[in-house]
């Protein structure tokens, strides 16, 4: 099992550009999550999904969109990149809910200039 | 909304000394509690978790934590620090039935030889 994989590892965007951060898990987990990590701020939940076709907002959803067409994939879309979106993004998954261990991907470092 | 407080953003201990990392949470219902560790340029991985049952929880690498409801705390300890323990440690809480994970701001542990 590869676990949770994320691509790309690093990306530089110009203000106003768009991009999609990819996340795939091969553990047949139902729940998937997107977080951003900023220095001294811990992790903030952006969006989560409880299964294919079902997504919901987390604590900091503004400026992002998600979709979940399959159990395995949970891409995060930035439509109009802003400097405030410079961060490290982590995808995670659990089998069936918020009482379980989260399995994290290695992260995507995004710089918006 | 939940809040998670980790006292001390940086903690330094000597090799072989006791490690104590503090975590307090706010919740009106018994929460689920987690400690995660993050090594440089990696995703987070679970150290230990409390859901129900015994309040003293043992995790990997010799770490343990005790859930104290009266103090709303879940402090992480290890009797003897090893150089390999140097990392960032995050306390996290989820509160049923809400679908959210809340992370503390993290504590960076330095181990001095």
Image (spheres, helix red, strand yellow):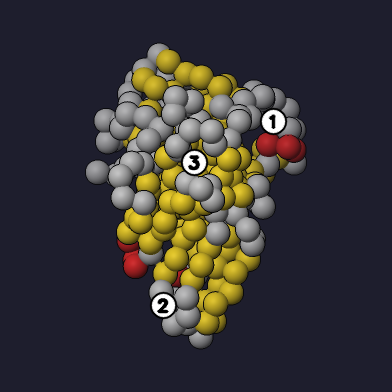
Tell whether label 1 touches label 2 (CB within 8 Å): no
Establish if B48 lies above or below A110.
below
Residue at the spot 64% in from the left edge and 62% down from the top edge: B8
Q: Disc 3 and disc 1: Cα gap in Å?
A: 30 Å
Residue B31 visible somewhere in the drawing: yes
- Specify the farthest residue to the front: B70
Q: Which residue is mark 3?
A: B93
| Residue B22, image quadrant | bottom right
- Locate residue A46, reporting x and y percent: 57, 30
Residue A12: quadrant of the picture: top right
Query: Do pointers 3 and 1 mark residues of a single chain?
Result: no
Residue A21 shown left or right of residue A40 in the figure: left
Crowdedness near tag 3: few (<14), some (14–19) or many (≥20) residues, C-alpha within 10 Å? many
Q: Is residue A56 above or below residue B52?
A: above
Foreground mark, 3 or 1? Answer: 3
- Residue at 51%, 67% in the rendered image: B20
Q: Mark yes or no: residue A72 visible.
A: no
Q: Secondary structure at mark 1?
A: loop
Q: Between B16 and B67, which is closer to the camera in this rendering?
A: B67
User: Residue beneath label 1, please?
Assistant: A81
Note whether B22 is above or below A53 in the view shown.
below
Name the chain under label 1: A
Placement of the N terminus of chain A among the 4 image quadrants? top left
Residue drawn at 60 percent across, 31 percent down: B1
Have a look at marks 2 and 1 and say if they share a chain. Answer: no
Give how far across and how far down residue B53 sits, in percent: 30, 45
Instruction: Kindly identify which residue carries mark 2.
Output: B80
Up the image or down, B37 lies above or below A105; here it is below
> Which residue occupies 38% across, 61% down?
B64
């Amino acid at each position: 099992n590869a676990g949770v994989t994320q691509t790309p590892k690093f990306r530089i965007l110009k203000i106003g550009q768009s991009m999609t951060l990819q996340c795939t898990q091969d553990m047949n987990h139902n729940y998937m999550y997107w977080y951003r990590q900023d220095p001294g701020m811990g992790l903030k939940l952006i969006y989560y999904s409880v299964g294919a076709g079902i997504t919901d907002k987390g604590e900091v959803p503004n400026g992002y969109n998600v979709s979940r067409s399959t159990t395995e994939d949970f891409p995060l879309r930035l439509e109009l990149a802003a400097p405030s979106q410079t961060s490290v993004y982590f995808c995670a998954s659990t089998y069936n809910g918020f009482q379980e261990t989260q399995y994290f991907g290695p992260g995507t470092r995004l710089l918006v200039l | 909304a939940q809040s998670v407080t980790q006292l001390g953003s940086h903690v330094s201990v000597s090799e072989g000394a006791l490690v104590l990392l503090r975590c307090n949470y706010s919740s009106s219902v018994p929460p689920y509690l987690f400690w995660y560790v993050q090594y440089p340029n990696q995703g987070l991985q679970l150290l230990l978790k409390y859901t129900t049952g015994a309040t003293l929880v043992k995790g990997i690498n010799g770490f343990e934590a005790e859930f104290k409801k009266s103090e709303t705390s879940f402090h992480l300890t290890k009797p003897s620090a090893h150089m390999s323990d140097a990392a960032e440690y995050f306390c996290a809480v989820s509160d049923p039935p809400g679908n959210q994970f809340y992370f503390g701001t993290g504590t960076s542990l330095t181990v001095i030889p």
